[in-house]
Image: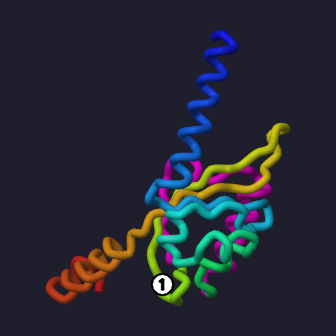
């Protein structure tokens, strides 16, 4: 590749990254090693109801239900320490989350570790999608099925 080709490719990547971060419907949230929010895209503002000025600098506890926090931070600390997570390899995690108005929502997400020039983990980024409607539909279907055939669900 020529220098001009490399510069063009880098320019396209930068333009594409900016466009995706600012316009994609999914929430994209980045954090530092301690779990403080360092990036909050418009999709995150739509999903959670906090604008970037309210979220950036805050702990992820902003969107994590209190009863889920201990488990979350245990996993977060393990990923920061080891650099390994199955959710960075394409597996999707579904978890409850909190919106600004106090509603519990269901989100699915994947993560990517963020590293500095030396390869040291500096934080992570998550791409999240609201799956509350699908989750509620599945719960209702399970209840309906259980009412019709309790033995199917081991009740």
Can you give x and y, in whole percent of width and height, for residue 118 in the image? Answer: 85, 38
Residue 154: percent from left, percent from top: 29, 81
Compared across the picture, whether 58 is left or right of 52 comes to right
- The residue lying toward the viewer, choosing from 4 and 65, is 4
Which corner quadrant holds the N terminus?
A: top right
Dot 1 falls on a residue whose secondary structure is strand
**Image quarter (top left, top right, bottom left or bottom right) of the C terminus:** bottom left
Magenta portion: prevailing SS class: helix
Q: Residue at x 76, y 52 (%)?
A: 82
- Depth check: give the residue in front, 20 or 126: 20
Q: Residue at x 62, y 30 (%)?
A: 11
Q: Crowding at label 1, few (<14), some or many (≥20) Cα neighbours within 10 Å?
A: some
State yes or no: residue 82 in magenta.
Answer: yes
Q: Position of residue 51 (x, y in %)?
A: 59, 73
For mark 1, what is the residue?
104
Give the magenta-colored segment's residue range: 67-96
């Amino acid at each position: 590749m020529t220098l001009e080709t490399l510069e063009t490719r880098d320019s396209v990547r930068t333009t594409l990254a900016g466009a995706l971060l600012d316009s994609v419907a999914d929430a994209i949230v980045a954090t530092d090693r301690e779990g403080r929010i360092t990036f909050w895209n418009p999709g995150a503002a739509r999903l959670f109801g906090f604008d970037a000025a309210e979220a950036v600098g805050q702990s992820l506890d902003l969107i994590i239900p209190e009863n889920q926090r201990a488990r979350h931070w245990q996993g977060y600390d393990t990923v920061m320490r080891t650099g390994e997570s199955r959710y960075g390899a394409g597996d999707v995690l579904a978890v409850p989350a909190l919106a600004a108005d106090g509603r519990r929502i269901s989100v699915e997400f994947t993560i990517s570790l963020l590293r500095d020039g030396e390869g040291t983990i500096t934080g992570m980024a998550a791409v999240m999608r609201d799956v509350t409607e699908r989750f509620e539909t599945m719960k209702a279907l399970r209840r309906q099925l259980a009412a019709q055939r309790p033995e199917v669900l081991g009740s």
